[in-house]
Image (spheres, rainbow, N blue to C red):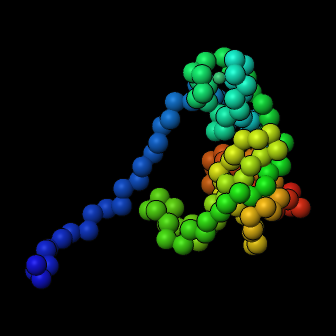
Amino acid sequence: MGVSEPFITSKTLSLVYRIPISRIEKFWESLKEGRVLATRCKNCQTLRFPPSATCPSCFSPDVEWVELSGEGVVETYTKIMAAPASFSGEAPYTVVVARMKEGVKVLAWYEGENISIGMKVRLLAKEEHGSLTYRFVPWDEQGD
Ligand SMILES: [Zn+2]
């Protein structure tokens, strides 16, 4: 106690995630086309986002693609001031959970100034830093 340990500062490590997506590849292809897709189980009708090749409710592999309308209502949100290391250059940013018109909840970053619970938001497919993603914007914005 009270003795400070000697230390060295190592190089910053960069992580590259390689996630197998062969069964949900269509999701990424659709983002390129500006569409956000969910999956619906043909057996029990459970709608799932992010899409899942296997139904989380009944474990059926028989799922179909459903395009989300993009129309959502904010259920909760948080403004991130102290970001985890992988997003440290991005803070502050706002993360929203919205219930989509189709009934499924979506968690995504929010691009806008004002936010409140019950507010209508639009879900948009985007390309950012060379990666495909999706974001919420205020309902009356079309995004850039
Ligand atoms: Zn199911």
The residue drawn where x is 74% and y is 58% is 74
- Total numbered labels: 0
Which quarter of the figure has residue 9? bottom left
For the N terminus, the image quarter is: bottom left
Residue 65, given in percent of the width and then of the height, sits at 74, 27
Q: Residue 29: tell me if it is visible.
A: no
Which quarter of the figure has residue 66? top right
For the C terminus, the image quarter is: bottom right
Depicted 86 relative to depicted 104: above or below:
below
Q: Nearer the viewer, residue 114 or 74?
A: 74
Q: Residue 89: tell me if it is visible.
A: yes
Depicted 134 relative to depicted 96: above or below:
above
The residue drawn where x is 83% and y is 49% is 71
Question: Which quadrant contains ligand 1?
Answer: top right
The residue drawn where x is 13% and y is 74% is 5
Q: Nearer the viewer, residue 12 or 92?
A: 92
Residue 114, given in percent of the width and then of the height, sits at 76, 72
Extreme residue toward the right, this view: 140
The residue drawn where x is 68% and y is 47% is 106
Residue 68, given in percent of the width and then of the height, sits at 80, 39
Q: Nearer the viewer, residue 18 or 37?
A: 37
Depicted 56 relative to depicted 144: above or below:
above
Q: Nearer the viewer, residue 83 or 13?
A: 83
Depicted 75 relative to depicted 78: above or below:
above
Extreme residue toward the bottom, this view: 2
